[in-house]
Image (spheres, grey):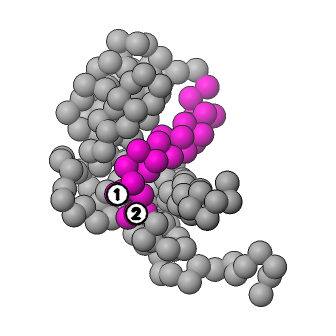
């Protein structure tokens, strides 16, 4: 075994299927790991209804468009509002770092949801996103950046629990 541990996970892959959660659930299961799951996060001085709202609001160039995105009734509608607005300059280069920070905020601010993420063990997280081949793995055709970032945040949570960070 390599000094830094095995290359493969011990747990089977975890698939986070595409869905459109409309409200928080008492027992959401893996659906809570969706970016559009209604778990409000505060970043800076703004509280967003979900990670999806925060991501799309931060992607648009104009303040009035940001306000409209935050007010959208679901993560899917936030995406639609943002798609009609101009993107910030340099967004494509910054979007992965922005998403990493938003996911970190979600799981730091919602320990109950962090427990769901931690329960995935060391599994590879496969995030299905019908709207994006960049964020979703989409049957092996996408890049699965959301899945990778969820694994990163899970690792950071575990490091903090072990007092390693």
Magenta residues, start to end: 90-117
Left of 75 or right of it: where is 25? left
Q: Is residue 32 above or below residue 95?
A: below
Q: In this orientation, which residue lies closer to the viewer: 155 or 12?
A: 155
Q: Which residue is mark 1?
A: 112
Q: Is residue 32 above or below residue 77?
A: below
Give the image location of residue 124, x and y in percent. 52, 71
Q: Are marks 2 and 1 in contact (CB under 8 Å)?
A: yes
Q: Residues within 10 Å of mark 1 (few under 14, many from 20)?
A: few
Q: In this orientation, which residue lies closer to the viewer: 23 or 131?
A: 23
Q: Residue furthest bottom?
A: 1
Q: Which residue is mark 2?
A: 115
Give the image location of residue 165, x and y in percent. 67, 54
Residue at the image position 49 percent from the left and 53 percent from the top? 146
Give the Cα separation between the discs numbered 2 and 1: 5 Å
Q: Quadrant of residue 89?
A: top right
Give the image location of residue 150, x and y in percent. 50, 57
What mark, if any, has residue 72 been given in the picture? none
Determine the secondary structure under disc 2: helix
Q: Is residue 111 above or below residue 45?
A: below
Count of residue discs: 2
Q: In this orientation, which residue lies closer to the viewer: 125 or 27?
A: 27
Report whether residue 72 is seen. Answer: yes
Left of 122 or right of it: where is 8? right
Residue at the image position 43 percent from the left and 35 percent from the top? 55
Report whether residue 83 is seen. Answer: no
């Amino acid at each position: 075994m390599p000094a830094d541990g095995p290359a493969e996970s011990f747990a089977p892959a975890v698939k986070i299927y595409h869905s459109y959660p409309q409200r928080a659930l008492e027992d959401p299961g893996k659906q809570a790991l969706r970016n559009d799951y209604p778990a409000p996060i505060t970043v800076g001085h703004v509280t967003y209804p979900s990670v999806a709202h925060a991501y799309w609001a931060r992607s648009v160039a104009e303040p009035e468009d940001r306000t409209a995105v935050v007010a959208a009734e679901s993560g899917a509608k936030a995406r639609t509002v943002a798609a009609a607005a101009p993107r910030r300059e340099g967004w494509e280069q910054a979007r992965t770092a922005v998403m990493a920070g938003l996911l970190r905020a979600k799981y730091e601010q919602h320990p109950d949801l962090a427990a769901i993420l931690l329960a995935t063990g060391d599994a590879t997280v496969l995030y299905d996103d019908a709207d994006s081949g960049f964020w979703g793995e989409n049957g092996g055709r996408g890049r699965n950046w959301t899945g990778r970032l969820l694994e990163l945040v899970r690792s950071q949570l575990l490091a903090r629990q072990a007092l390693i960070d």
